[in-house]
Amino acid sequence: MGDAPSIDIRRRAVRWWLLAVAALVFAMVLVGGATRLTESGLSITEWKPVAGALPPLSDAQWQVEFDKYKTIPQYAQMNAGMTLSEFKTIFWWEWAHRLLGRLIGAAFLLPFLFFLWRGFVDPALRGRLWGIFGLGAVQGAVGWWMVASGLVDRVNVSQYRLAFHLTLASLIYVALVWTADRLVPRAPVAVPPRQRAVAWALVVMVLIQIYLGALVAGLRAGLLYNTWPLIDDAFVPRAEHLFFDAPLWRNLFENTLTTQFDHRMAAYAIFLVAVWHAFDARRHGGGAAALVLAAAVALQAMLGILTLVYQVPILIALAHQAMAMIVLTLATLHAARLSAVPQGATAALAARTN
């Protein structure tokens, strides 16, 4: 009996730490979105994981960084004649994005090592947390891999690499939120198996939609076909416009019309599934969380339409990206709570941490 409060405190500490790291990842996604929207991502042309933590500290150092930027195609084709002051603006966005990545790494690893030392983490959870840390390390390398794609033959980064980078960040975020939520003892929720399946399907659908949105962003496809509900003068564009490139699969990733159409259709599908899921949940005497999720999906769809018809203004576009992460959060928590571990199993697991 005397051990129970200690176990509870340990679990709460680990949970709040994971939620704090998840909040940093949320912020990282928004700063990354602002970096992309301001065309700042290529302003730092080298990857220096340690030395790069410090910004230029003198006029001479600023000039060195500016001269490096002048050697890449983006400067020559988009920003020729840019002043040093203008360069500093885009540099600070990218520097802040990279600094936040370093901060997330430290905010995860240092408390994790402390919790391991103090015995706060049981063996099953330990492996999962090391896995999340490994994904974070991979994400740092993927970030540079993405930036490197825009330094030689392009004026922006590869949409393939951008989409992978954002989706991996979202997967890490889901893992953090899900793991933190599982540390709260909950009674199992009595719902039909299909509701659990649909709840997790919505998580997967939202992740796919985030990937599709990143393709649209990477291709600047949101600046085209700025009408709704029609696109290219039709609800469903002509096949020869959707699939003019060969091989056909390339249209899914490189055709601005096809990527935007896919993003729209995925949004409709998520909305319909979320609304159906909410009504299905209400039939079984609950469903408040499902209803909130459906409302969030509807709001996200409205923000997407506004982003499109106003041709991607930064504030609305960032609100759209933030709402995507909120929808992902709600979907993850909803699915996790429908898959709650019985309290007896949670208590047994907690007892092993003491």
Image (cartoon, rainbow, N blue to C red):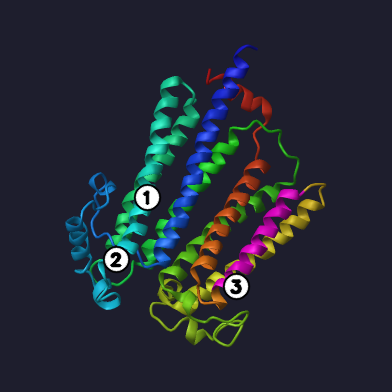
Q: Which residue, as the protein is rendered here, is positioned at the far top?
A: 2
Q: Say if the magenta span includes residue 90.
A: no
Q: Residues within 10 Å of mark 3 (few under 14, many from 20)?
A: many
Q: Is residue 196 visible?
A: yes
Q: Nearer the viewer, mark 1 or mark 2?
A: 2
Q: Is residue 130 left or right of residue 273?
A: left
Give the x, y percent position of residue 185.
65, 30
Label 1 sits on residue: 139
Q: Tell me the distance, in whole angstroms, between the alpha carbons under discs 2 and 3.
A: 35 Å
Is disc 2 placed on a helix, strand or loop? helix
Q: Is residue 134 visible?
A: no
Q: Say if the magenta span includes residue 292.
A: yes
Label 3 sits on residue: 305
Name which residue lies at 23% across and 65% down.
Answer: 69
Q: Residues within 10 Å of mark 2 (few under 14, many from 20)?
A: few
Along the line of sight, the residue nearer the viewer: 171 or 238? 171
Give the x, y percent position of residue 130.
41, 35
Q: How many marks?
A: 3
Residue type at tag 1: Gln
Q: Is residue 132 left or right of residue 191?
A: left
Name which residue lies at 46% across and 75% down.
Answer: 221
Most common secondary structure along the magenta stretch:
helix
Label 2 sits on residue: 85
Q: Tell me the distance, in whole angstroms, between the alpha carbons under discs 1 and 2.
A: 31 Å
